[in-house]
Amino acid sequence: MRLSRIIGFLNRRKENEMTGAGFIAGTVLGIIIGLYIFLSVLILKEVTLNQLELSLKPYERLISMDPVTIYYITLIATPLIVVFIHMIIGVVIGIGVNKLKKPSAWKILLGGAALGTLFGFITSAPAPRIVTFIVCLAAWIVFSLVFLLTVRLSNREPEDKTA
């Protein structure tokens, strides 16, 4: 998929308040998860380097970079990519919620908890699995809360400043 098509898809956030709320909540979610990945890779540098060396061993002749260089590329690029991916996920969720015609706040919170559980199991980080699970679950609950708050704020009537 070309970058221009992805940017065009992200521009769908302007279609209605649900996709806009999904974009904002997805950005917050991406920042939380991206920051977690950044910190876990930074703090657990030796673990990450050992994993990189093991992963690169079969491809030594094909890859001319040393693991330390790849570590620093990973440290910088991964959180940025995570934020970008979660922006897209947020817009997709916003489109889906918009089609549901005003689901209750509880359904959105339960959906966020379910997605947090799912992503908690499949997300890979150098930190212990339970920490990753808890961070993902909490981040997706924050996603749901930000989504709900953004929708509520976008539905408010502008205040009359003439009085």
Image: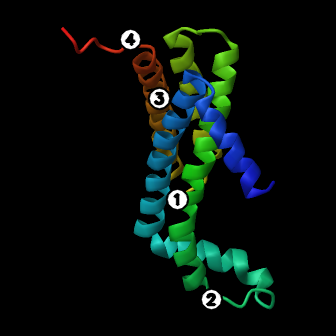
Q: Secondary structure at mark 3?
A: helix
Q: Which mark is residue 141?
A: 3
The amino acid type found where label 4 is placed reads Glu
* In the depicted structure, whether residue 5 falls above or below residue 60: above
Q: Secondary structure at mark 2?
A: loop
Q: Which mark is residue 66?
A: 2
| Number of the front mark, 4 or 3 | 4
Mark 2 / mark 4, whichever is N-terminal: 2
The amino acid type found where label 2 is placed reads Asp
Measure the C-alpha gap from mark 1 to mark 2.
Answer: 21 Å
Q: Which mark is residue 79?
A: 1
Measure the C-alpha gap from mark 3 to mark 2.
Answer: 39 Å
Pinpoint residue 92: horizontal percent, then vertical percent.
68, 32
Q: Are marks 2 and 4 in contact (CB under 8 Å)?
A: no
Dot 4 crowding, Cα within 10 Å, few <14, some 14–19, many 20+:
few
Dot 2 crowding, Cα within 10 Å, few <14, some 14–19, many 20+:
few
Q: Are marks 4 and 1 in contact (CB under 8 Å)?
A: no
What residue is rendered at 60% in x and 57% in y?
Answer: 81
Quadrant (top left, top right, bottom left, bottom right) of the C terminus = top left
The amino acid type found where label 1 is placed reads Pro
* In the depicted structure, whether residue 78 falls above or below residue 144: below
